[in-house]
Image (spheres, grey):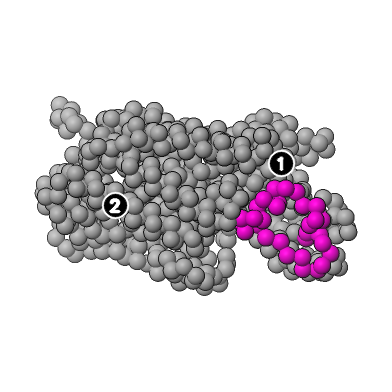
Amino acid sequence: MDLQTLTYTIVGITFALYIGIAFWARASTTGEFYAAGRGIHPIANGMATAADWMSAASFISMAGLIAFNGYGASVFLMGWTGGYVLLALLLAPYLRKFGKFTVPEFIGDRYYSRTARIVAVICLILASVTYVIGQMKGIGVAFSRFLETDYDTGLYIGMGIVFIYAVMGGMKGITYTQIAQYCVLIFAYTVPAVFISLNITGNPFPQLGLGGTMADGSGMYMLEKLDLVVTELGFKEYTTQVMGSKLNMFVYTLSLMIGTAGLPHVIIRFFTVPKVADARSTAGWALIFIAILYTTAPAVGSMARLNLMNTIQVGEVGSAEGNLSYAERPQWFRNWEKTGLLQYEDKNGDGRIQYYNDKNPEFAAKADAFGWKGNEMTKVDRDIMVLANPEIANLPNWVVALVVAGGLAAALSTAAGLLLAIASSISHDLIKGVMNPNISEKNELLAGRFAMAGAIALAGYFGLHPPDFAAGTVAIAFGLAASSIFPALMMGIFNKKMNRAGAIWGMTAGIGVTMLYVFQHKGIMFIPGTAFLGDMDPNWFFGISPNAFGAIGAVVNFSVAIAVSKITAPPPEHIQHLVEDIRIPKGAAAAVEH
């Protein structure tokens, strides 16, 4: 069976499964729409949480970042997994004990303020919509390759699929759909990784193959070989490459960590289990399920880079036969050219593909002597690497089709969770909580579905002109959550003296300074067609990139909130007792007295 037919078949079967589950588990009450009726088993919820968490950024984009940024891209591995531990230990159990449906609802009640709730809704929508844009980028990339069409058309089709099962199913339908999507995405990620690791290192375990020797009998370590290949073409050594300064690496990691702990679509997953103990159990299971992919990603990224370089650089650097002839380019190259995500320009007219770092002044003289007139691979979108990797490695067609299905599962699962968080904040927090408290359950459910449909349209519109590659866009979303929601939740749980004025001004200052910095250095990301500045800017604050600035915004949030709370009235006594009740288990006080 040819690749396109096989891809249609496998992807079609998975879509039918998702939509079938959504019909079977569709929400009929607001409790099922927002929290799946609080009846999900911790193991099942852990699997759904992992799928919700491992988005297009994890499946499609993270390994691409590792492929092109080497060691420096470890900030994503450390930040995202470390942040999940932070969420599991410091926030999830306490928020579940509080017993509300949404994060803004907790903030509104804890800070005894409708204004605080509204500010939280605005922060949630800004972070979640930005995050959805990253998922839409992943959906567009996967669909464009799957249908062999352009990126925009792929995105429109993906929006339609999300609309069908997310709007109808609510949290109940999304939860069971995400369990199926986890099984698809983890199988799709690990199977090709095993094949490629066997091909390159002879080791079936990618995690071990990453540190193993080449299977060609040379005795050279795989990473040593990769370092040699990339430095020969003027790129930085793969194993020592960093993203900016060490300070930027640290702040980037911190921003991703606390952003993770402040993401509403992940937090609301812990509201779907029956008990507080189940929330802790969910976190443990989710970490196990997440670890399978996250320990595999470094091997996938490094092996993808090695395969790409070896495919294009087929002989001695600088020799006439050293570069691949464009006329003889492999089928995978032709397939990705159709999407517009891979582009070639014959700058010196020799009909061969020169792929090198033309921004390296030390390599420029060599390149000129070779007759090279610039890097002719004018576009290699980082987000194609995981999907293209099996084709580059000449794996069987069913493996290639499986990876496409996995990439779509990752993007769709997270997009659905994010859209639900946006919809619930509008229907439950704004409409029911502020504008019309007496709205019927039926009308609230209808409002939630309309809000989700609107969010899909908005995210798709911005997804046509994303401000960055998928993981970069997601990092901006994490920064917005880190600078606004995370501090409000932490102080709401662990600082009983924090009052509403402090929370409101803290959230406003934190997200305000972060968005200002992002707008200044990345362009106005929400207006399509705006130009963005390059990867490095001498005007960055202490060399901190916009994608990493959320941690600085969080510091501003904490500082402003604490300062304002010191000069304004403390919270009422019943609110302070409420905070103590959230943290302290029942009977603990009596046990201490005795």
Residue 564 part of the magenta-drawn span: no
Q: Is residue 429 above or below residue 506?
A: above
**Residue 343 in magenta?**
yes
Instruction: Kindly identify the amino acid type of the residue bearing the numbered disc 2.
Output: Phe
Vertically, is 277 above or below 578?
above
Left-right relation of 488 to 216 = left
Residue at the spot of label 2? 450
- Whether residue 458 is visible: yes
Task: Name the front one of labels 1 and 2.
Answer: 2
Residue 128 in percent (x, y) is at: 37, 54
Q: Nearer the viewer, residue 563 or 226?
A: 226
Residue 113 in sight from this viewpoint? no
Please give the residue where the numbered disc 1 appears in the rendered image: 393
Q: Residues within 10 Å of mark 2 (few under 14, many from 20)?
A: some
Lower position in the chain sequence, tag 1 or tag 2: 1
Indicate the secondary structure of the residue bearing disc 1: loop
For the image, the number of numbered tags is 2
* Residue drawn 42% across the image and 31% down it: 285
Is 566 in front, or is 244? 244
Q: Secondary structure under badge 2?
A: helix
Range of residues picked out in magenta: 325-354
- For disc 1, the neighbor class at 10 Å (few under 14, some 14 to 19, many from 20) is some
- Residue at horizontal 44 percent and vertical 38 percent from the top: 51
Residue type of the residue flagged with mark 1:
Ala
Q: Is residue 360 left or right of residue 245?
A: right
Residue 520 picture location, percent across and down: 45, 72
Q: Position of residue 360 (x, y in %)?
A: 72, 66
